[in-house]
Amino acid sequence: MDIARKCFSNYNLKNIFERLFGIGNAYPLSLLPLGSMVNSIELYPASGSQLVRSAGTSALFYKKSDTHAYLKMPSVEDFLFR
């Protein structure tokens, strides 16, 4: 361990996701961990929110490959993104 390196305890680890990604921030799906709940999805960059826009709805990011990301939508259908 280096000098001045931050050390996290159990107390800090329970909110690590919010610290790393922040609630309300926008990220490409390729950067998010599996199991993330996402909303306000854009189909193309800077095109505006087009999917999962209603209050209280979210899609589950459950699988990714080299070229695709898979989301389980609120309508229980799977959606494939490139």
Image (cartoon, helix red, strand yellow):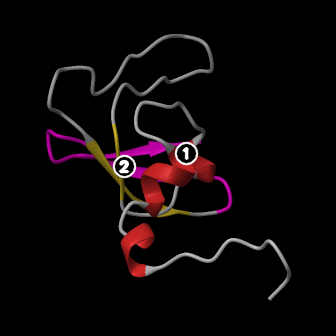
Residue sitting at 50 percent across and 24 percent down?
43
The disc at residue 42 is: none
Q: Quadrant of the N terminus?
A: bottom right
For the residue pair 35 and 73, the one nearer the viewer reads as 35
79 sits left or right of 74 in the view:
right
Q: Residue furthest bottom?
A: 1
> Circle 2 sits on which residue?
71
Q: Whole-percent x and y of residue 10?
A: 40, 80
In the image, 78 versus 11, the foreground residue is 11
Q: Does dot 1 land on a helix, a strand or a loop?
A: helix
Please say if 2 is above or below 33.
below
**Residue 29 got which mark?**
1
The residues colored magenta run 66-82
Q: Percent position (x, y) of residue 8? A: 54, 75
What type is the residue that disc 2 sits on? Leu
Is 74 colored magenta in this rendering? yes
Q: Quadrant of residue 73?
A: top left
**Residue 14 vertical position relative to residue 29 in the rendered view, above or below:** below
Q: Amino acid at mark 1?
A: Leu
Screen quadrant of the C terminus: top right
Horizontal relation, residue 21 to residue 76: left or right: right
Is residue 75 placed above or below 8 in the rendered structure? above
- Outermost front residue: 3
Mark 2 nearby-residue class (10 Å; few <14, some 14–19, many ≥20):
many
- Circles 2 and 1: CB distance less than 8 Å? yes
Give x and y (percent) for residue 9.
Answer: 47, 79
The relative height of residue 18 versus residue 5 in the rendered view (above or below) is above
Q: Earlier in the sequence, mark 2 or mark 1?
A: 1
